[in-house]
Image: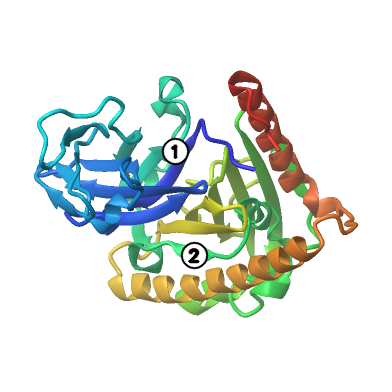
Amino acid sequence: MFVRNCWYVAAWGSEVGREPFARTILGEPVVLYRTESGRAVALEDRCCHRNLPLSMGRIEGDAVRCGYHGLKFDPTGACIEVPGQSAIPPGARVRSYPLIERWKLLWIWMGDASRLDESLLPGWHYIDDPRFAVAHGNDAKPLPMKSHWELNNDNLLDLSHVVYVHPTTLGAHALDFPITTERFERKVRMSRWIPNSHPIPLWAKYLNHSGNVDRWQDTDCEFPSHCTVDVGFAPVGRLRPGDDRDHPDALRLRALITATPETETSSFMFYAQCRNFAVADEEMTRKFVRDVRVIFMEDVTIMEGQQRNLSRRPDAPRIDINSDAPHLAMRQLVRRFAAEEGRVTGRSAA
């Protein structure tokens, strides 16, 4: 199931330059490149003459030329040249997809361009906030996942898994503390407050911290798949569950994570880490990049294992437990928007 009238990350901006760059998004082949001025362009990766991927061609000025018979397409997708003839055949064009470059990411709108809404981008301004040290995950390249994109939402809205999947990094025990689920128009929030407890192993390792702390695990998942995971801690008694996490005594890490569907059973994870401590410590940033990549690869292994069984037995019976409430709410939200989109377009939401 794909929902199209929303923003997805197509690429890190640094991935796209003056050579054609191919990526499949929502089952559709897309070619990305930059014009001479540096503006990023996204076109259907298919020549409308004989179907060769335009990514197998070359960039000329602001246009891309097909590598088969030389038809040339401008950034709007219109064919502007056919070698050997002066007339352009009617209908000689390919689809152009709207792009916005924001926070060093290229955001693509795969649906109805007339419904495009820039305000629906997630609030990931932390990437450009000088108060945070920012690391672009996986060296500013997506992690490919052989799993359905919604499994990433499930994973990030149920952080009880860290005890078992990430025991040496994130796995300080927290399962005795309840979660709170909040539902909004376009997002779901999961919150867990963990008072007077051991810090997670990663905090203890990086900060040489001993003794108990008050800590939290919060995830905001904005439709369709843009998750802000906010984790951190403060000295015991300095904060209460509802207090602003920007308290000067609070050490916090925001992981910004999204999954872009490639096909029904594969996707791309894009992520960045933003922390408010040791902001100028480049060695700590390198450690975060290294350790968080290991953590996310552990998640990918889990999600790909789930997908293998889901593909083998899609109708196998399953149960739900208490910690499932946030991701079940997010799945309901996605299905509501999919159904609304299907009613508008006449396309099945299934």
In the rendered image, the quadrant that contains the N terminus is top right
Per the image, the residue denoted by label 2 is 144
Are dots 2 and 1 in contact, CB under 8 Å?
no
Residue drawn at point x = 34 percent, y = 33 percent: 98
Q: Earlier in the sequence, mark 2 or mark 1?
A: 1
Observer-nearest of 54 and 115: 54
In the rendered view, tell whether residue 268 sits above or below residue 338: below
In the rendered view, tell whether residue 213 sits above or below residue 221: below
Residue drawn at point x = 42 percent, y = 27 percent: 119
In the rendered image, the quadrant that contains the C terminus is top right
Look at the image and tell me whether residue 94 can be seen.
Answer: yes
In the image, which is nearer the foreground, mark 2 or mark 1? 2
Q: Along the horizontal axis of the image, is 41 left or right of 80? A: right
Q: Along the horizontal axis of the image, is 180 left or right of 253? A: right
Q: Where is residue 216 in the image (x, y as percent from the top left)?
A: 63, 55
Dot 2: within a 10 Å radius of its alpha carbon, few (fewer than 14), some, or many (20 or more) residues? Answer: some
Total labels: the figure holds 2
What whole-number distance in Å separates the C-alpha atoms at marks 2 and 1? 24 Å
Q: Where is residue 339 in the image (x, y as percent from the top left)?
A: 69, 28
Tag shown at residue 123: 1
Q: Position of residue 28 (x, y in %)?
A: 46, 46
Residue kind at label 2, given as amino acid type: Pro
Dot 1: within a 10 Å radius of its alpha carbon, few (fewer than 14), some, or many (20 or more) residues? Answer: few
Q: Along the horizontal axis of the image, is 125 left or right of 54? A: right
Q: Along the horizontal axis of the image, is 341 left or right of 195? A: left
Tag shown at residue 250: none
Observer-nearest of 300 and 177: 300
The secondary structure type at the circle numbered 1 is loop
Observer-nearest of 168 and 59: 59
Residue drawn at point x = 75 percent, y = 61 percent: 310
| Quadrant in which residue 276 is drawn | bottom left
Residue kind at label 1, given as amino acid type: Gly
